[in-house]
Image (cartoon, coloured by chain):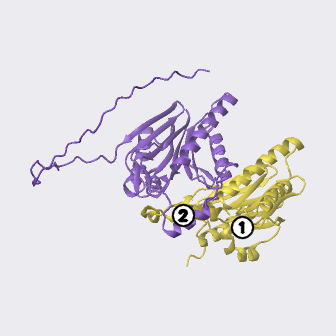
Chain colours: A purple, B yellow
């Protein structure tokens, strides 16, 4: 018997949980949600912050999107890289962007990065980890340059460099060996590019291109793609067969026979105007 | 509870990629931790390690677990990072409002009670072990410990976190009441070093804060500044 889903209250619905468990047990696999396997990273450098991300979105074992954008806009002085469930990330960052814009209009000034951090952590904590969004938030405001790592359960850490996602270990090893305080822009961009490349090449959940976003007190620059690390190979040969490769044994032609023809006039009905 | 919910969530994955995704990706962020606080005449000394773990991965090796509640009240956080950060933010905001209403800084006991109210009433949904410590003009330096179930008790010395199990014996043997400030800092530094070197979930640097009527003096002890013990 089918159960009617009660949609009268907002938030997550768990009424189908028992049914889904039963189906899985009987051999019907759960549909895979689209996840961003991902390598994302952010660092603080002399003039601001650099955020980086790969561009692969996976649905189970298949690559659903070879060039998705994981660096999301929040404010002119703040961007957010996201790892986790793609839908959750899109919705969360868009919601935050609109909340932050309202905040900016309300207060009449540039939104400080701590405000975005607070709002994100309070929302994710409220949902107790069910929103699968792991974020690297970066921005520059009048006080300082900030990088925050935000976990799905709502804990945040303010750090000079951080990585998230399935490729985070590969990226973090690059940072741990080469990050120094007060790097120049060129060096900083190269470092983030190398860290993401570590994830792209050594993690199956990350791949394709590397996007970068540089934020300074003068504004933000999105470079998409910064590096096309995986170029599709050129096809080496032609794989077509010439006519006559397969021998034709016999040919039979059966034309379509028209049995009858009728003409029906189409009456144009006047539009109903009340 | 939060960790059970995470386990249920991971049923969604049934592909090869799921087995390649490391275990720590599905774990909640915990502060493995060694924390402690000691009263002395004139204030308190609070101390903590700096490791935040997600399963076996250290997600932050320079965490600050000594969180400001008010200018003269700090709390040491252990357990779930998300839960303790959220609770500390709530209590801190309550204390700020209270300070405006009272016209003076709130008492340590009030802050500790506020922590306790949240930790006790939501005990089934939280995983938070907190030590509240600070200085106020009515009772001087005070330490209140609030372990997992939400009980609150004042103690001259309190330890907490997974690393504390290794040093109960040490504090029983080595703690002397009526130490001065520098002796207390040294005692905290030694105790945390012992805990940190034996507990896998604790590590990094040792952070210490001394809270007196004059303010808060924060210190960091890096690896080379920690005392050396028997390494066998």
Please tell me which residue lies in front, B232 or A118.
Answer: A118
Query: x and y percent of residue A232 in the render?
Result: 29, 47
**Which residue is identified by label 2?**
B11
Give how far apart the Cα atoms at labels 1 and 2 are. Answer: 34 Å
Residue B180 at x, y percent in the picture:
79, 62
Q: Which quarter of the rendering shows the C terminus of chain B?
A: bottom right
N-terminal-most mark, 1 or 2: 2
Query: Under tag 1, what secondary structure?
Result: strand
User: Badge 1: how crowded within 10 Å, few (<14), some, or many (20+)?
Assistant: many
Q: Chain of mark 2?
A: B
Image mark count: 2
Q: Relative to A153, is A188 above or below?
A: above
Residue A89 in the image, given as x and y percentages of width and height? 54, 46
Could you tell me which secondary element the residue under label 2 belongs to? helix
Give the residue number, with chain letter if any, for mark 1: B160
The subunit carrying tag 1 is B
Position of residue B177 relative to residue A59, above or below, is below
Is A98 displayed left or right of B104 in the figure?
Answer: left
Q: Is residue A96 left or right of residue B43?
A: left
Image point 59% across, 56% down: which residue?
Answer: B62
Would residue A81 be seen by someone viewing this image from the given angle? yes
Residue A170 position in % (x across, y down): 43, 57
A220 and A60: which is toward the camera: A60
**What residue sits 48% from the left and 44% below the top?**
A70
């Amino acid at each position: 018997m089918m159960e009617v889903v009660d949609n009268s209250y907002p938030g997550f619905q768990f009424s189908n949980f028992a049914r889904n468990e039963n189906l899985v047990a009987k051999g019907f696999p759960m549909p895979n949600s689209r996840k961003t396997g991902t390598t994302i990273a952010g660092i603080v450098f002399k003039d601001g912050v650099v955020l980086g991300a790969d561009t692969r979105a996976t649905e189970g074992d298949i690559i659903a999107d070879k060039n998705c954008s994981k660096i999301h806009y929040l404010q002119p002085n703040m961007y957010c890289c996201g790892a986790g469930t793609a839908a959750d990330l899109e919705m969360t960052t868009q919601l935050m962007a609109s909340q932050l814009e309202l905040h900016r209009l309300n207060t009449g000034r540039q939104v400080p990065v701590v405000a975005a951090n607070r709002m994100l952590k309070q929302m994710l904590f409220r949902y107790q980890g069910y929103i699968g969004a792991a974020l690297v938030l970066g921005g520059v405001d009048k006080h300082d340059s900030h990088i925050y790592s935000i976990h799905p359960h709502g804990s945040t850490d303010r750090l000079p460099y951080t990585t998230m996602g399935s490729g985070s270990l590969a990226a973090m090893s690059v940072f741990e060996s080469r990050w120094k305080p007060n790097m120049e822009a060129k060096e900083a961009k190269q470092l983030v590019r190398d860290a993401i490349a570590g994830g792209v090449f050594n993690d199956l959940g990350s791949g394709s291109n590397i996007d970068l976003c540089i934020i300074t007190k003068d504004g933000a620059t999105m470079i998409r793609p910064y590096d096309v690390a995986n170029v599709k190979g050129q096809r080496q040969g032609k794989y077509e067969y010439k006519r006559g490769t397969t021998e034709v044994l016999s040919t039979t032609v059966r034309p379509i026979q028209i049995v009858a023809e009728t003409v029906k006039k189409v009456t144009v009905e006047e539009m109903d105007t009340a | 509870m939060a960790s059970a919910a995470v386990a249920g969530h991971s049923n969604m994955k049934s592909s090869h990629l799921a087995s390649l995704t490391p275990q720590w990706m599905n774990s909640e962020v915990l502060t493995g931790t060694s924390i402690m606080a000691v009263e002395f005449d004139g204030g308190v000394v609070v101390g903590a390690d700096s490791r935040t773990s997600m399963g076996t991965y250290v997600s932050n090796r320079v965490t600050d677990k000594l969180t400001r509640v008010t200018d003269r009240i700090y709390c040491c956080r252990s357990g779930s990072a998300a839960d303790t950060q959220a609770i500390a933010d709530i209590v801190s905001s309550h204390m700020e409002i209270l300070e405006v209403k009272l016209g003076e800084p709130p008492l340590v006991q009030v802050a500790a009670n506020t922590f306790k109210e949240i930790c006790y009433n939501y005990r089934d949904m939280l995983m938070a072990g907190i030590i509240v410590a600070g200085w106020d003009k009515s009772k001087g330096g005070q330490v209140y410990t609030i372990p997992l179930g939400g009980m609150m008790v004042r103690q001259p010395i309190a330890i907490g976190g997974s690393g504390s199990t290794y040093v109960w014996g040490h504090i029983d043997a080595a703690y002397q009441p009526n130490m001065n400030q520098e002796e207390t800092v040294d005692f905290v530094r030694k105790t945390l070093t012992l805990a940190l070197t034996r507990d896998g979930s604790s590590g990094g640097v040792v952070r210490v804060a001394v809270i007196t009527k004059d303010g808060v003096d924060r210190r960091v002890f890096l690896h080379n500044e920690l005392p050396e013990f028997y390494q066998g």
